[in-house]
Image: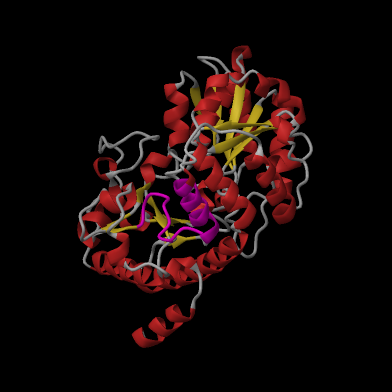
Amino acid sequence: MESADAAADAARTDPLVRLTVDQLRQRSSMKWRTHPADVLPLWVAEMDVPLAPAVAETLHRVADLGDTGYPHGTAYAEALAAFAAERWGWDGLRVEHTAIVPDVMLGIVEVLRLLTGPGDAVVVSPPVYPPFYAFVAHSGREVVEAPLGPGLRLDPAALEDAFARARRGGRRAAFLMSNPHNPTGVVHTRAELEAVAALARRHGVRVVSDEIHAPLVLTGARFTPFLGVPGAENAFALTSASKAWNLAGLKAALALAGPEAADDLARMPEEVGHGPSHVGILAHTAALRDGTDWLDDLLRGLDANRALLGALVERHLPGIGYVPPQGTYLAWLDCTALGLHDEDDGSAAPGELGVVSDLAGPAAMFLDEARVALSSGHVFGTGGADCVRLNFATSPGILREALARMGRALAGHRPPRDR
């Protein structure tokens, strides 16, 4: 079986099979340096891939020319517009309705400042990306939850109730949406997004859509830009090439305004545009413009890893729930059957990053007993406490070893009594 697995891995041509564990351990970024060397890190959203050639060539050219000055021009937005038209059939992106921001989360904060004030409400749909809580709370806004419904999909009834609560007393309100959804990997359908737009209009709620994972939609689903659906003309979207091309260390993102939100975008302070890196802008532009063949190879590899992960969960982790993600490279595992979560454990609140000191429940067990680092579900808000998030953007060999370790830990684990 191992020789057959090795042969299958060798036949793959995607970037997920290019780097060895020894090479990855030479990296100095968060994923590979937070934990000791005996831990396999499948937590934070970094991919174990080399740079796309188009990006690497751009960075070499920058170094050769010393082209490290201040940003200029609209090439980034133009590249995104062309990418959106080609990949998603969306030709509604207007370059004049965009602004460069330091990264997606800081861009979200700045957009929320345009739409709301201190004490106003921001609706989120948990379990959801932890900084949605932290950044909103740090900005003096109240978080209002509209938990996901059946199938981990957006729940219109929960949204309607949350929108009404958010607007109570005449407050301004926004809905901060993850599209595709992190951590579940759900790709919202056009019909679902149209329902969101209609509800938001009815209640006077402005939608801000985080679309950083938009290029990472896998076989069987299709991404729909929120600004492309009827009723979303007063909404915003934030995106970048960061997740799809592994460029988190090269800061640059774009804020996109619907036609009715262009005047709001024009009020964004000029200094916000001073935060992005010129080198980052050049790298993201190259990825969108010239890195699509590499992206296609990556998506084929992620498809293969998604299927592999499903087989490994079935083999090694009986009783753990897994719904294959439609997009992203993140898998949401329901570990309720382990009986590990303690409501009174005093662990981190939603919104923290889920690093070593914040781990609880199943993530803590898998780190301690399997030496596999996963993101702890409790930091993703309501519905996350008994879950973990697993990053499968790694080599199939690392994935097999990690799941085998988790299976051995699970086999030796005895759930506490009186649960």
> Is residue 366 in sight in this rendering?
yes
Give me the residue at 55% from left, 17% from top. 120
State how many labels appear. 0
In this orientation, which residue lies closer to the viewer: 151 or 46? 46
Which quarter of the figure is the N terminus placed in? bottom left
226 on left or right of 210: right
In this orientation, which residue lies closer to the viewer: 184 or 67? 67
> Is residue 202 in sight in this rendering?
no
Give me the residue at 57% from left, 53% from top. 151
Of all residues shown, which one is farthest toward the front?
Answer: 65
Residue 59, percent across and down?
48, 50
Of all residues shown, which one is farthest toward the top?
Answer: 169
Query: Hey, which quadrant is residue 22 in on the image?
Result: bottom left
Give me the residue at 59% from left, 43% from top. 211
Numbered range of the magenta stretch: 42-64
In this orientation, which residue lies closer to the viewer: 394 or 326? 394
Q: How is the image coloured?
A: secondary structure
Magenta span contains residue 61: yes
98 on left or right of 367: right
Give me the residue at 53% from left, 53% from top. 244
Magenta span contains residue 102: no
Instruction: State whether residue 5 is above or below residue 337.
Output: below
Residue 208, percent across and down?
61, 32
Residue 265, percent across and down?
66, 24
Residue 325, percent across and down?
53, 58
Instruction: State whether residue 339 is above or below residue 273.
Output: below
173 on left or right of 21: right
